Amino acid sequence: MPVDVSWYDEKACIVWIQFSGRWTIAEFRSAIPDIYALIESKTSRVDTIVDLTNATAIPRDVITSLRGSTLRAPDNWQSGVIIGAGRFVDALLTAFRAVYPKVVERYQVAKTHEDAIEMINKLREDNS
C-alpha cells in the first residue's frame, strides 16, 4: 500500500503514517479516516510521524491536502514530525509556512525516527 497507517509505539500515542513509492493525493485522502480513527480512539494527546523515507515522489497538490487534513484533525492531535523529507519537501514547507503559518507550526522535520521521537518528547515536555 502506498500509504500505511499504524501505531508507532506500544503506548499508542504516536501514529505512524508511512508513504511508499509513487503515492497519490487520492491514496492519502483515503487513509485520512484511518488516521483520524486512531487519533480519536484516544482521549490523550496523539502525535504523528509522517515517514517519507520510502516515497519516490511527492504529489504537486500536497499542500492543499495537508492544509485541509490539518484543519480537520481531531482536537487531541498535536504535531506531525516528517522524516525522509528531502529538499523538495523542505521547500514546500517553507512556501506553506508563508501562506498558512498557523497550520505549518504544527509540523517539524527530522532526519531519523530517533530524532522524530526526541522532537515529540521535547514538544510534550514543553506543553506540560
Image (cartoon, grey):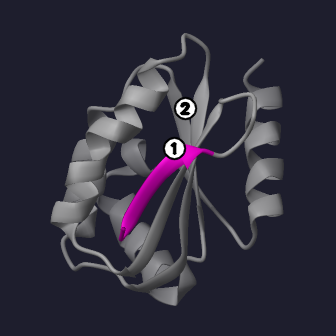
Name the residue type under label 2.
Gln
User: Mark 2 highlights which residue?
Assistant: 78
Q: Quadrant of residue 34?
A: top left
Q: Tell me the crowding category of disc 2: few under 14, some 14 to 19, or many 20 or more residues within 10 angstroms, Cα based.
A: some
Residue in the foreground of this view, choosing between 57 and 71? 57
Horizontal and vertical percent position of residue 61: 18, 71
Q: Residue at x 27, y 64 (%)?
A: 63
Q: Which residues are magenta?
A: 1-7
Q: Is residue 2 above or below residue 122?
A: below
Horizontal and vertical percent position of residue 56: 42, 89
Name the residue type under label 1.
Arg
Asked whether residue 125 is drawn in magenta, I would say no
SS for dot 2: strand
- Mark in the foreground, 1 or 2: 2
Q: Quadrant of the N terminus?
A: bottom left
Q: Mark 2 and mark 1 in contact (Cβ < 8 Å)?
A: yes
Q: Is residue 115 above or below residue 8?
A: below
Q: Quadrant of the C terminus?
A: top right
User: Mark 1 highlights which residue?
Assistant: 106
| Between discs 1 and 2, the one toward the N terminus | 2
Q: Is residue 77 above or below residue 29?
A: above
Q: Residue at x 29, y 44 (%)?
A: 32
Q: Is residue 87 left or right of residue 104?
A: right
Q: CA distance from mark 1 to mark 2?
A: 7 Å
Asked whether residue 6 is drawn in magenta, I would say yes
Residue in the foreground of this view, choosing between 128 and 74? 74
| Residue closest to the far top | 43
Horizontal and vertical percent position of residue 10: 75, 34
